[in-house]
Image (spheres, rainbow, N blue to C red):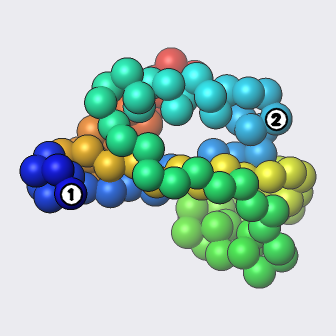
Amino acid sequence: LCPEMLCAQRCALVMRPALVKSGMDELILNYFRLNDFTLISRVFVKLDEDQTEFFALLENIREEERKEYLEMMGSGLLEVILVSKRAAIIEVPLFVMQANLIN
């Protein structure tokens, strides 16, 4: 391994089906590439019912929003991307916060 990778941190990014269907996942991935993240792995998965329920718990989805959330997460493929960079666990949440401010 190169010396930079010894100090790097890994983060998993989960792209929802709407992002994958729209192609926005490529734009987000390009952001990480342009900011010197290393792409380690990239897979597309279709969640089963138990996995979808797990994500609802993980994201603290309220009961009144649960049905819509489960339908959305089960509507297509999710993309799971593993990236690496020094201070990745600091930079990834900052990007997510910035993206939420834009929406």
Q: Label 2 is placed on what type of residue? A: Lys
Of callouts 2 and 1, the N-terminal one: 1
Task: Label 2, secondary structure: give it.
Answer: helix
Q: Residue at x 10, y 50 (%)?
A: 3
What label sits on residue 70 in the rendered view? none
On the rendered structure, is 17 left or right of 4? Answer: right
Q: Position of residue 9 (x, y in %)?
A: 24, 55
Q: Label 1 is placed on what type of residue? A: Leu
Residue toward you, 91 or 10: 10
Return the residue at label 2. 21
On the rendered structure, is 66 left or right of 40? Answer: right
Q: Residue at x 82, y 35 (%)?
A: 21
Q: Is residue 75 above or below residue 91?
A: below
Cα separation between marks 2 and 1: 35 Å
Q: Position of residue 59 (x, y in %)?
A: 57, 61
Q: Crowding at label 2, few (<14), some or many (≥20) Cα neighbours within 10 Å? A: few
Q: Is residue 20 above or below residue 58?
A: above
Residue toward you, 64 or 46: 46
Give the quarter of the image for residue 68.
bottom right
The quadrant in which the C terminus is found is top right
Q: Residue at x 83, y 74 (%)?
A: 48
Q: Position of residue 70 (x, y in %)?
A: 82, 62
Residue toward you, 2 or 77: 2
Return the residue at label 1. 1
